Amino acid sequence: MTLVFYPPLWMKLLDEAKARIWLHITTEEPFLRLETAVNGQCSEIIIELVVKYQEDSSELEAGFYPQHKRSMAWMLFNDTQTFRSEIKKLAARIVPIEYNLSAPKSAMTEREQLEAVKQKAAAFLEGAKFLRGECDSLGRASNFAHSALRNICLAVYYSNSVKSLRQYVELQHFVPYKALALVAAIVHSILSTYERHGFSKVELLNVGELEDSYQRLLVLMDTVALNMYHGPKLTAMLEDWVQTGMSVFICELVHVISPVLQDRVHCERSNSGEAGRLGGNFRLIFPLIRITLVYNTILA
């Protein structure tokens, strides 16, 4: 059952529900289990919104709930897979450009060209070099700072869509670690495809491999976060990304609120960095899994 089946107000509610499930998988649990999600998180989001609409005196068309509540929950669960696929589609356009995955002119034959691209991708994957941005002014590594990660995060989480996640406070102070890890895991998947084939082959996301990569990246991110030099630097960078992503949103907001509140908006933007530096973005969870990424090459 698709969204167009429902009357207008239900369509609006379900669009909001989709945004909320995107928020959940971005900031909390990106790999929901079918056996628990449909009756759990997906149903809970719909119930919360039905109550909200009723409290707002919005007259939802009768006869659709509870008759179609399970179909609605299934729709949300399916949308979690769609969301990851959409991230991959966008990333697949950005990755070959940002990582320059093209063969040099010296590669004359098709075999040489494919091999050259495979080697480039393998070099980025080795030691998790694909995560690194340019070194800072002290010559130290910039972790999880590659421009590909930044551009994908901004395009996915801070778009102009009505379902954009920038409308939620969870993404208005810094890019959450889990949100960045999800993007990084998908970039890892795309680079792995280039390493195997030498070109961007259309492949479905392998959820098992993606989740494994995601968990390893979270552990690596924890290691960076706890480093006295790299931790604050990572937090400041993620705050800076949000300032870029939120700038249009804040400007639009200031135009429609009272001038009395404009200084408060400016103040909250100024203070958001301090909130992050006090440790709000630091995760202290270390899953007991085998780490295959190379720590000593990223914490330079």
Image (tube, rainbow, N blue to C red):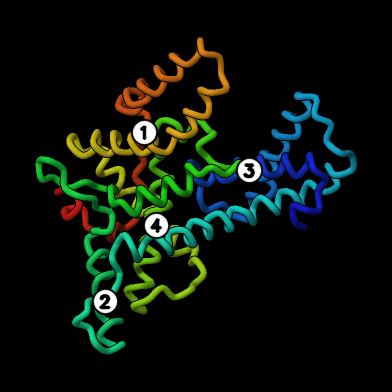
**Residue contact between numbered discs 3 and 2, judged by CB atoms under 8 Å:** no
Q: Which mark is residue 281?
A: 1
- Relative horizontal placement of residue 187, taking residue 69 as reference (left or right): left
Q: Which mark is residue 185?
A: 4
Residue extending farthest top: 260
Amino acid type of the residue tagged 3 in the rendering = Gln
Compare marks 3 and 1 and give the one earlier in the sequence.
3
Q: Between marks 4 and 2, how big is the CA–CA gap? A: 24 Å
**Quadrant of the drawing holding the N terminus:** bottom right
Amino acid type of the residue tagged 2 in the rendering = Ala
Mark nearer the viewer, 3 or 2? 2
281 relative to 149, above or below:
above
Percent x, y of residue 135: 16, 47
Disc 2 element: loop
Compare marks 4 and 2 and give the one earlier in the sequence.
2
Few, some or many C-alpha atoms within 10 Å of disc 4 (few <14, some 14-19, many ≥20)?
Answer: many
Q: Between marks 3 and 1, how big is the CA–CA gap? A: 23 Å
Q: Name the residue under label 2.
A: 103
Compare marks 2 and 1 and give the one earlier in the sequence.
2
Q: Which mark is residue 41?
A: 3
Q: Between marks 2 and 1, how big is the CA–CA gap? A: 40 Å
